[in-house]
Image (cartoon, coloured by chain):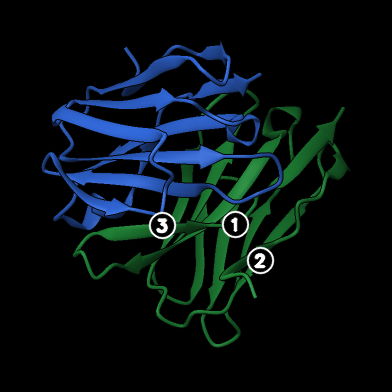
Amino acid sequence: ETGVTQTPRHLVMGMTNKKSLKCEQHLGHNAMYWYKQSAKKPLELMFVYSLEERVENNSVPSRFSPECPNSSHLFLHLHTLQPEDSALYLCASSQEGTRVGEKLFFGSGTQLSVL
Amino acid sequence: QKEVEQDPGPLSVPEGAIVSLNCTYSNSAFQYFMWYRQYSRKGPELLMYTYSSGNKEDGRFTAQVDKSSKYISLFIRDSQPSDSATYLCAMILRSTGGYNKLIFGAGTRLAVHP
């Protein structure tokens, strides 16, 4: 089983839909992240949860709503998205508070298309 | 000015060539430097991790950091078709929230052809 699992792998939604992305990490880490990856742009950090508390909300529009019910699971709830939100959404985890906390482990991502 | 600059490529080389990938950065507060490799339809995976200026070698891969010039490089020797991927440089900034924040370059797409 891979360390960080994301579902679904692909998602197509209309602008009025509500959907959720799910991430699960099996590495025993205490921090989880959502990143957005658009073509030819750097990965954009969206949200960070450390010890299940949100510690970063990087000026993300309110149509993206994260949820972290425990240290192993992370959700990204989506509603009334715009076509420019189409991108690869990546989840990552790390072990904060240690030297290795600098190393992020990524899932395979959810490729989102908004019509 | 972007915090991290990376040429997006694409870079196309023949099998066996030496590949040089580079990033420049503007913030002298960056402390750790990494290279991630991302295959098509996959998430990035950590390839190399360095802290100090100088070279670090791992098999066919060498990471080089020059803090005085704010320049990092990744060299791939004897490149293989399986090295075809996008290579992302990343740098760590300690955030005011007390956790480590990774700043990524846009990635360089590499194609190694047989």
* One can see residue A22 in this view: yes
Circle 2: residue type: Glu
| Residue drawn at (70%, 57%) of the image | B21
Give coordinates of residue A26: x percent, y percent: 22, 22
- The numbered mark, 3 or 2, whose residue comes first in the sequence reads 2
- Disc number at residue B5? 2
Residue B109, image x and y in percent? 74, 42
Q: Is residue B85 above or below residue A55?
A: above
Residue B96 % position (x, y): 24, 70
Mark seen at residue A94: none
Rendered residue at 51%/18% (across/down):
A16
Q: Tell me the subunit letter for badge 3.
A: B
Q: CA distance from mark 1 to mark 2?
A: 6 Å
Does residue B22 appear left or right of residue A57 in this picture? Answer: right
Chain the render paints green: B
Tell whether label 2 touches label 1 (CB within 8 Å).
yes
Specify the subunit that label 1 lies on: B
Q: Earlier in the sequence, mark 1 or mark 2?
A: 2
Secondary structure beneath label 2 = strand
Q: Residue B21 versus residue B104: which sits nearer the camera?
A: B104
Residue at 13% over, 39% down: A52
Relative to residue A10, is residue A98 depicted above or below? below
Residue on which disc 1 sits: B105
